[in-house]
Image (spheres, rainbow, N blue to C red):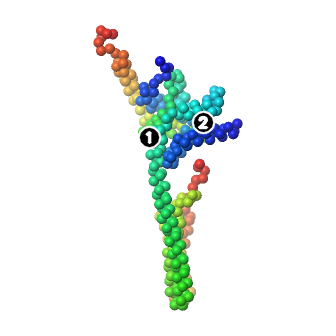
Amino acid sequence: MTRNDNRRDKRIVDFIDTLFVEVGPSQQLFDLKEELATNMKERILDFQARGIDADAAFKEAVIAMGDLSGLVDDMRRIGQDTAKQSVYSSMSARISTIGLVSGVLLVLFGVLTSAMVYYMNISGVAAAGNGVFVVAGGVLVTYSFLTRETSRKYAMNKVRAALFALAIGLVLFAVFTAIMTHLAVGEMYITIASLMVFLLTGIGLFLFLVLTGTDRRKDTQRR
Amino acid sequence: MTNTISTDLIRGHTDTIILNVLRQGDSYGYEIYKKIGELSGGQYELKEATLYTAFRRLEQDGCLESYWGNETQGGRRKYYRITDAGRALYQQSKKDWSFAKAVLDKLINGGLDDDQE
C-alpha cells in the first residue's frame, strides 16, 4: 500500500519535473510544482475511489492537466533572472579563487623573504619588515575565503567580509608592528604599547562581527 | 450536437467563472475545478492548465490572494481568496455579460426585416 503510494507520488513528481525541465529554478517554480502535484494527487485519488486502477487514473490526470506551455514560458522568464545570478556567482567564485591563491602566495613570499634576509645577517628589522607581506596576504585570504560561495554556505556580503578582513589585518598588523618595535627599540613596554593599539581595535571589530553574524548555512530542508 | 460547451465560447469568461467560485469561499485548484464542473451541471469541463494560468494572472492583477494550507496526506494545498478588487471585477464582468448576452442574442437570432419574422 505505502509502496504503491510512494510509487504514485514519485510518478507525479517526475511528470511535473519533466514538464519544467530546463526551466531555471525560482521560488515561484518551486511553489507551482508543489501546487500542481497536490492537486494532481487528489484527482488521482478521486479517480481511484471511483474504481479506476492506478495506471488509468494517472493517465486521466495527465490528460486533465491540459496544455501547460503558457505556464512553462512564464516560469522560464522568471527563471532567467536566476540563471543570471548563477553566472554572477561563478564569476565571483573565480575572483575569490584568484584572491585566495594570491593571498597564500603573498603570505609565503613574506615568510620566505623574511627568512632569507634574516640569514643574510643584515638586521633583524629588515628581516621582520618583510612581514608586511604576511599582513597583506592574510587580509586578502580572509576576504576571499569569506566571499566564496560553497555548496553548503552562501557567500558573506562584501562589506561584512571586508570588515572581517580589516579586523584580521589589524591583528596581524599589531603583531607586525610589535615585532618591528621590539627589534628596533628593544624595550618591552614600548613593544606592548604599540601592540595594544591595533590589537585592541582588531579584536574589538572581530568580536563585534562574530556576535552580529547571521547564519549563512544553506537550507537543507528544501528538496 | 455535443452536451458540453465549446472552449472558444467560454475562453473570455474563465476569470469571471473562477471569481464566481471564490466569492463563495476560499478554495484550491482541484476543488475549484470540481466546483466549476458542478456549476455547469457537468456540461463544461475545463483543463487544469487554464486554471493555473488564470490564477497567476488574477493574482498579479490583485484580484486574488493565495496562501498555503496545512500539510495533508496529499501535500500542501495552495488556497486562493478573492480580494475587494476581485469582487469589483466580478460585478463589472457580470454586468458586461448581461449586456453582451442581450446584444449577442439580437445579433445571432434577430432578423433585419420584420416581415421575415
Task: Please give the residue where the numbered disc 1 appears in the rendered image.
Answer: B60
> Is B106 located above or below residue A98 in the figure?
above
| Residue at left offset 53%, top offset 34% | A65
Res B7 → quadrant: top left
Q: Secondary structure at mark 2?
A: helix
Reply above or below: B100 against A161.
Answer: above
- Residue at 53 percent across and 41 percent down: it is A19
Please tell me how crowded label 2 is: few (under 14), some (14-19), or many (20+) other residues with Cα within 10 Å: many
- Residue B33 at x, y = what percent? 53, 30
Rendered position, A106 above or below A40: below
Q: Chain of mark 1?
A: B
In the image as oriented, which residue stretches furthest toward the right? A1
Quarter where residue A186 is shown: bottom right
Quarter of the picture containing the N terminus of chain A is top right
- Residue B29 vs residue B6: left or right? right
Q: Which residue is mark 2?
A: A41
Foreground of the two, B39 or A190: B39
Question: Residue A156: x, y in percent?
Answer: 52, 61
Q: Amino acid at mark 2?
A: Lys
- Circle 1 crowding by C-alpha within 10 Å: few under 14, some 14–19, many from 20: few
Determine the residue positioned at 46% across, 29% down.
B17
Tell which residue pokes out farthest to the top in this image: B115
Q: Secondary structure at mark 1?
A: helix
User: Gap between marks 2 and 1, in whole Å?
Assistant: 26 Å
Residue B91 position in % (x across, y down): 41, 29
- Is there any visible trace of residue B33 in the rendered image? yes
**Residue type (three-letter) at the residue carrying disc 1:** Gln
